[in-house]
Image (cartoon, rainbow, N blue to C red):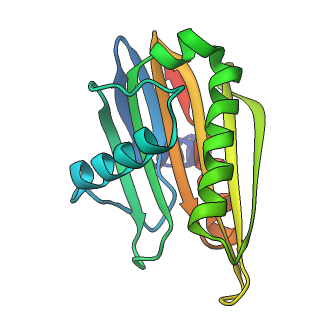
Amino acid sequence: MKRFFVIIIILFSHYLIGQKNYKINSSTWLYTAPINYISKIDNFEKERKKGEKYLKKEEKEVTFSTDDVILLSLQKKDSSTNVIFVTYKNNFNIKNHTLNGYAQILKEILIRNGKNEYPNNESSVTVDEILIDKIKFNVIRQTIFFNDENYIGTKDFYIAEIDEKEFMIVVANVNEEDRKNVKNSILNSTFKN
């Protein structure tokens, strides 16, 4: 019996060591990254500004914040296009359009983006609602079928309103195994007040 408790303690300790806490105002997000993902800190500002410039050009219905907080950026160790990017910012767009309305606006942006950026490839965009630790998220998935290279790429945008902030997890994957591992890591995350 003593051996059983020692094993449980070791397993629990291993779980806690990999888990990290991230503050969103007064809430805390507890997240364990998938195996083989490492922190990637370079080029945040450059990439954020490039994306913001594109969206401003493409979309007039969405207001852009100047208070984005980058919580996390991870990339798979093999330097592939498998990345996780987590931010939060003011909830202005959610307040103006509701969470579902905002997700639909982002869906339309991604549909246009797919047609413009990948004209020779099939692209689809879906929106689903899920619960993560009892918090409602809208998940916008853009799937691109790269016909010449014979692979499927996905971008998932998990969006929720947490502690009066827009919380977003952006995931890009190029293979099914990483899609599943990252999705499971997100679905198993928790939030504390």
| Residue at the far bottom in the pictured view | 148
Image quadrant holding the N terminus, namely top right
What residue appears at the point 48 percent right and 71 percent down from the top-left corner?
81
Residue 158 position, x and y percent, is: 60, 37
Left or right for 161, reference 24: right
The image quadrant of residue 161 is: top right
Residue drawn at the location 21% of the way across and 59% of the way down: 42
Picture layout, residue 42 above or below residue 94: below
Q: Residue at x 69, y 90 (%)?
A: 148
Q: Nearer the viewer, residue 154 or 72?
A: 154
Residue ID at (59%, 43%) = 157
Q: Quadrant of the C terminus?
A: top left
In the picture provided, is 42 more to the left or to the right than 54?
left
Residue 96 in view, yes or no: yes
Count the marks: how many? 0
Residue 61: % across, % down: 54, 26
Residue 131 in percent (x, y) is at 72, 27
Which of the 4 image quarters holds residue 23? top left
Q: Is residue 1 visible?
A: no
On screen, residue 187 above or below 184: above
The one of 96 and 59 positioned closer to us in this rendering: 59
Rendered location of residue 32, percent (x, y): 48, 45
